[in-house]
Structures are given as C-alpha cells and as structure tokens.
Image (tube, helix red, strand yellow):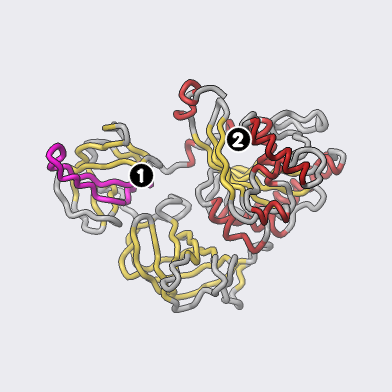
Amino acid sequence: MKNVSENGYLDMELLRFTTAGSVDDGKSTLIGRLLYDSKSIFEDQYEAIKVSSERRGETGVNLALLTDGLRAEREQGITIDVAYRYFATPKRKFIIADTPGHIQYTRNMVTGASTANLAVILVDARKGVVEQTKRHAFISSLLGIPHLVICINKMDLLEYDQQVFERIKKEFQAFASKLKVQDIQFVPISALKGDNVVEKSQNMPWYGGPTLMYLLETIHIGSDLNLVDCRFPVQYVIRPQSDEYHDYRGYAGRVAGGIFKPGDHVMVLPSGFTSRIKAIDGPDGPVKEAFTPMSVTIRLEDELDISRGDMLVRVNNVPEVSQDIDMMICWMNPVKLKSNGKYSIRHTTREARCVIKNILYKVDVNTLHRIQEDKEVGMNDIARISLRTTVPLFFDKYQINRHTGSVILIDEGTNETVGAGMII
C-alpha cells in the first residue's frame, strides 16, 4: 500500500457499515475475506492467523481470526463483543463493526449499528431467514440505517443453487415490506471461497448483480445526512485567556445537522438569544462552512451566556423543545425497565434526569406485532415508552436526524448504560 497522502485516503468518503446475522452465518469469515482479497492486511498478520489455524488443527487459513480478538471468541468460534476494523481501497475508506449473532448479545449489535450507513446481514443459505435475521433487520430499520445488503452465504454448500437464493430473497422481501428501509440489495456469496465478495463468482453465472465490495465502494451515502436542519450541540466553551487570545470565546462541538457559515443568523437554546456567526475554526484553522459530522469551534459576534448542553440552531428552523418524550427503546441491562423508575438521560451534550411515565407496548421482532398485555421489558427487548425529563431537551424525530433523535438511559446507582432510545 502506498503512502496514505499519495492515494488521497485522508480526503476520501468514509463508509461505516455493520455486519449482522445469526450464529455461525460467517460474519467474521466474510470480513476476513474482504480484508484479505482487497489486499488490506499485512503479510505478518496473514502469517499469524495461518500459524493460529495450523495450531488449531484447521485445514486452510481461518480468516475469521482476523476479527475474533477475544480469547473466548477464538475458543468458541463465535463473536461476543463488537470488533471494529478499518481499511481503505482506492475509492473509499471503511469502518466495519462486526457484531455478535447470539440473542443475548443483541445489545452489542445496537451499539455497533448505531452510527452505520449500511448494514450487511448474513443469511445461511441452508437455514434461510431465521429469528435473528428478522431481529437484526428490524433493529437496522429502527436505527435508521438507510441501506441493507442481504448476503446469502454458504452457497458453495448448496452447489450454488439459484432457486435457493430466489426463495430466501422472496422470504426476506415479504418480511421487509413491513420495515422502513429505503434500499435493500441481495448478493449470493461464499465467504469461505470468496464468491461474489471482492471478485465476481464463476460458479454463479445466473447472478448478474454487483459483488459485495462493488456495492460498498459505490453505494450513494451523501444524501443520507441531514444538511437542512442546522443543529450544533455545544460540548465545551473555549476561553484561553492568554495574551495572544485574550478575548477568544469559542463554542466547540460536533455539527449534528445542517450547514453553518460565518454570517449566519443563529439562535441559542434554551435561552432564545440570537446572534450571528463571526467565524468557524477547524483543527487546521478557519473554515468557510461546517457540516455534519465535522468537529469545529464556532465564534459569535455577541458575548452570550452559553454552556455545555446548549444548542445553536437557525432562527427559523428550531427543533422540538419538550420535557415529555415518546421513544422506542432497546433495553440493554439484566435488570428490567421499571415503570416510574428514575434514570439519568443523555441527549447530544445535554444531561438530565428522567422518570418513566408509561410502558406502552413491546415489539415481537418476528411478526412486528405489538405486545400490549406483557409490559415487562428485559434485556434485549424493544419497547415503546414515554418519559418526562427534569429539563427540556431539544430534539428532532429520529427518522429526521439520528444525532438529535437519539438518547441513552443510565442507571444512576451503577452508572451503566441500560437503554438506547430513538425518539418518535
């Protein structure tokens, strides 16, 4: 691989994607194959997993060992934690979140998929669409992931039968018709043999679509960002108070939506005071415009009382401001969600306390039906709840903006993250 700057990798578009599927569907093997066939691993890494494979008595090189980093994962041949891998091709940079397949690790899948542009869901061609396939597709839809690629894996074990592929595709499409997903693609693959992963398969001439790598490199993600609704949660106030920057007052944070430019008329929430943007500073100096997901420091023409948790917005485009919030929640803790229970809540850079007012229903992920008679929400359950916060939050619906439409709930006693919520 050439020098990073020579290839311009630093300036290329970044695609975040997650892999999901049931146990032993071949997620880690697929990622290993992607990395190996795209020449994204070093020789010493390959030699290390080759030695590990031989030590374990396996024939051939087990590419899954590239991502299964925990000892328990290697011993059991499964993924337990979310494993992140970074690689680049001449066309795009990638961050992969390899998420677990077991039902008890669904919460890890939520963590890994929360920032993804695309989800690769693996289906074992021998088993077809199973409960975990539906669960992961539903969670991907719930998390607002705009693109799904359904990889029907292990086609080599069924002699690359086109009828198997078409049957599973039809079965998934019937389920997905109930989901809110903009774009679904289907690719028949063999992660073990490399068919249709990076190179076009010679064993499936009946498949005329793109390979998985071609999809990852070319799928359009520019329009997935919200560049209309300007949202800038303030994370930190910068006051150097040095001789050189005696009067400097900047508000640092990450743009959560829209485009900010010097001269823009902005409003500060919750105070409602207005001002104009004097300048925007990036890591390398002043910038002409800031958009999601850039981290910048915004300076205003007026000296206003602004602190962490406040938000800069456009005067004529304000988010919802309320203490009463409805949301879908993925519960992540062994201790059940308590009706009337009190939790800490974090939304963008704002922290508050909240009380659970009502548990409206749980969702059956197989049928997507609402379960209204059973309102006990345990670990890995998905439910709709309403809560009230101690201070107003400034939010958009999750479908409009994933940054300003998401929250996490924290147990005040243990400081554990117990739930991830999507505001509806």
What residue sits right under mark 2 in the picture?
A: 216
Q: Is residue 47 a member of the stretch shown in magenta? A: no
Judged left or right of residue 394, residue 150 is right
Image point 69% across, 57% down: which residue? 132
The three-letter code of the residue at mark 1 reads Val
Image point 57% across, 60% down: which residue? 107
Q: Which residues are magenta?
A: 230-258
Q: Sequence-wise, which precedes: disc 1 or disc 2? A: 2
Residue 217 x/y as whole percent: 59, 31
**Considering the numbered disc 2 on the image, is that residue within a helix, a strand or a loop?**
helix
Which dot marks residue 255?
1
The three-letter code of the residue at mark 2 reads Leu
Which dot marks residue 241?
none
- Label 1 Cα neighbours within 10 Å, binned few <14 / some 14-19 / many ≥20: many
- Residue 182 showing in the rendered view: no
- Residue 420 showing in the rendered view: yes
**Considering the numbered disc 1 on the image, is that residue within a helix, a strand or a loop?**
loop
Eyeballing the image, is 354 above or below 113?
below
Q: Looking at the rendering, in which quadrant would you find the N terminus?
A: top right
Majority secondary structure of magenta residues: loop
Residue 399 x/y as whole percent: 48, 52
Residue 56 x/y as whole percent: 77, 47
Image point 50% across, 36% down: which residue? 14
How far apart are the alpha carbons under marks 1 and 2?
Answer: 25 Å
- Count of labels in the image: 2
Judged left or right of residue 156, residue 109 is left
Given residues 192 and 59, the one toward you in this image is: 59
Eyeballing the image, is 392 above or below 211?
below
Judged left or right of residue 155, residue 87 is left
